[in-house]
């Protein structure tokens, strides 16, 4: 972000790179948990992930479309997206390591 020098398009590019890294980790942790779960635990994990994803996408889109925030809306949306994916990833990784 420091290298973006305040240019929003560069900041968004940087954020996208970080989101992609976390998304890969999230998918790895989720797939590991999914593969090791059976029965009701498996079904619960599927429901939980779908609910998280629905909220994640809804909030990301809501923030990006905020008419009162101009171009900063995209930065706010991306900041939420990155934090939300990182939080979910760490939670799934902790569960997978148990």
Image (spheres, helix red, strand yellow):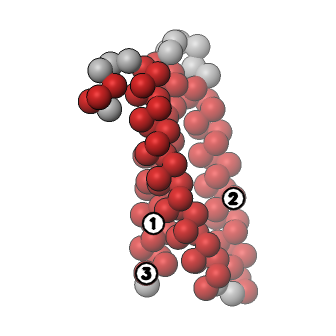
Q: Which of marks 2 and 3 is nearer the N terminus?
A: 2
For mark 1, does the 10 Å Cα neighbourhood hold few (<14), some (14 to 19), or many (20 or more) residues? Answer: some
Q: Where does the image place residue 7, in percent across and percent down from the top left?
A: 38, 18
- Could you tell me if the residues under marks 1 and 2 are in contact, i.e. CB atoms within 8 Å? no
Q: Where does the image place residue 16, in percent across and percent down from the top left?
A: 49, 39
Query: Which dot marks residue 97?
Result: 3
Q: Where does the image place residue 6, in percent across and percent down from the top left?
A: 32, 19
Residue 42 image-quadrant placement: bottom right
In this rendering, the answer to whether 55 lies above or below 51 is above
The Cα–Cα distance between marks 1 and 2, rounded to whole angstroms, is 15 Å
Residue at 58% across, 63% down: 27
| Residue positioned most to the front | 3
Query: Which dot marks residue 91?
Result: 1
Residue at 47% across, 76% down: 95
Residue at 45% across, 71% down: 93
Picture quarter with the C terminus: bottom left
- Could you tell me if the residues under marks 2 and 3 are in contact, i.e. CB atoms within 8 Å? no
Residue 82 visible in this rendered orientation of the protein:
no
Q: Which of marks 1 and 3 is nearer the N terminus?
A: 1
Residue 87 visible in this rendered orientation of the protein:
yes
- The residue to which callout 2 is attached is 50
Q: Where does the image place residue 69, in percent across and percent down from the top left?
A: 49, 15
**SS for callout 1:** helix
The Cα–Cα distance between marks 2 and 3, rounded to whole angstroms, is 21 Å
Front label number (2 vs 3) = 3
In this rendering, the answer to whether 69 lies above or below 55 is above
Q: In the rendered view, does 41 fall on the left or right side of 18?
A: right
């Amino acid at each position: 972000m420091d290298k973006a020098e305040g240019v929003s398009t560069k900041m968004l590019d940087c954020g996208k790179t970080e989101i992609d890294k976390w998304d890969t980790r999230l998918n790895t942790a989720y797939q590991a948990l999914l593969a090791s779960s059976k029965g009701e635990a498996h079904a619960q994990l599927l429901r939980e992930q779908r609910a998280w994803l629905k909220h994640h996408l809804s909030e990301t889109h809501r923030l990006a479309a905020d008419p009162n925030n101009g171009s900063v809306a995209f930065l706010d949306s991306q900041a939420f997206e990155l934090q939300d994916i990182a939080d979910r990833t760490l939670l799934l990784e902790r569960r997978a390591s148990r």
